[in-house]
Image (cartoon, rainbow, N blue to C red):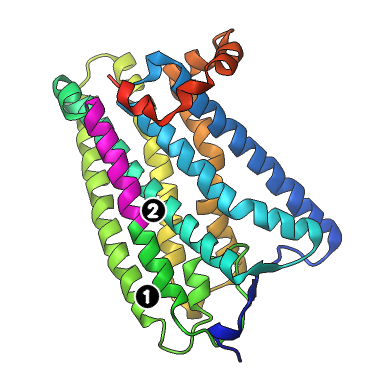
Amino acid sequence: MSNSSSITHFLLLAFADTRELQLLHFWLFLGIYVAALLGNGLIITTIACDHHLHTPMYFFLLNLALLDLGSISTTVPKSMANSLWGIRAISYAGCVVQVFFFFFLISAEYSLLIIMSYDRYVAICKPLHYGTLLGSRACVHMAAAAWDTVFLYALLHTANTFSLPLCQGNAVDQFFCEIPQVLKLCCSHSYLREVGLLVVSVFVAFGCFVFIVVSYVQIFRAVLRIPSEQGQHKAFSTCLPHLAMVSLFLSTTFFAYLKPPSTSSTSLDLMVSFLYSVVPPALNPLIYSLRNQQLKDALSQPLLVHNVLQSWPCLELGIGLEIT
């Protein structure tokens, strides 16, 4: 038995006990991490440096790539380092920082996915009002509101979680620090306050999910009324990848944060956490680049590498002001 004042570090869950499997885990995560870095970095650079892509849809896609880079960089490198060096420890402060940034980034990503569904709804169902409803200022304001709101939201949850007394040891049953696993270490019934906050958050998230579903019902109805098959295919190609990632992200996140601790399984927890923390950042670049002809055309330009090297200043935050 211990309390939070005496805990200086936490012990993360190891994927394997043998040295060979630890190294296998390191190389597997390294490959995924490098792929996520290259894919998201390429999307960010391409959108930032190609003025033809300075539109609301690609502006939000750029923000999504930034969030994916941040979320996977919050969890995977520490797990890789632990496997490489054969250790499990993460400092108390490191765990707090990891919980905050991960919760902040996945919450911001969910907010951005909601905004992206609204963008697709306006583009397909109200195309004549697209420039009015999603002008440059509106896009920047929506993105800024998503980042700012979830920053305070994540700060509240992190402060509340680590203000609770810990008396169940310091072993976290996960390869990174997340709120449900930290709550398992809290003293009996002392975690109910944070659970209440999470339940309220889930209801809000579910309300937003209903908004996404209603938006896509309207989108699909509008798409099916398009007379040409080429037009239908183009509309579906921009909507289906987004809907698939929203479904994967929400289903696994809801399961991770809502399941009762008594029914928890370590292997199941690992699989679910892998699906919502590692898979989306690695697959998003592949899905969006392969299903988007305009982005593929930009990526296939012969002078892309030269333009990227010559145009790093365009990566400044001022890109949002150039949206038309």
**Residue 9 found in image quarter:** bottom right
271 or 44: nearer the viewer: 44
Asked whether 148 falls inside the magenta stretch, the response is yes
- Local secondary structure at mark 2: helix
314 or 15: nearer the viewer: 314
21 or 35: nearer the viewer: 35
- In this rendering, position of residue 189 left or right of residue 208: right
Residue at (60, 37) in percent of width and height: 37
Residue at (31, 42) in percent of width and height: 144
Q: Which quadrant is home to the C terminus?
A: top left
Point out residue 137 in the picture as x, y percentages from the top left corner: 23, 30
Name the residue beneath numbered marker 1.
194
- In this rendering, position of residue 18 left or right of residue 109: right
Q: Which quadrant is home to the N terminus?
A: bottom right
Tag on residue 322? none
Point out residue 40 in the picture as x, y percentages from the top left corner: 54, 33
Q: Is residue 226 above or below residue 10?
A: above
Q: Who comes first in sequence, dot 2 or dot 1?
A: 2
**Residue 91 found in image quarter:** bottom right
Residue at (57, 31) in percent of width and height: 39
For badge 2, the amino acid type reads: Ser
Please identify the residue farthest to the top as the structure is shown.
302
Point out residue 125 in the picture as x, y percentages from the top left corner: 18, 28
Please identify the residue farthest to the bottom as the structure is shown.
1
Point out residue 296 in the picture as x, y percentages from the top left corner: 49, 18
Specify start and end residues of the magenta stretch as a single range.
135-151
- Local secondary structure at mark 1: helix
Report crowding for label 2: few under 14, some 14 to 19, many 20 or more residues within 10 A (C-alpha).
Answer: many
Name the residue beneath numbered marker 2.
107
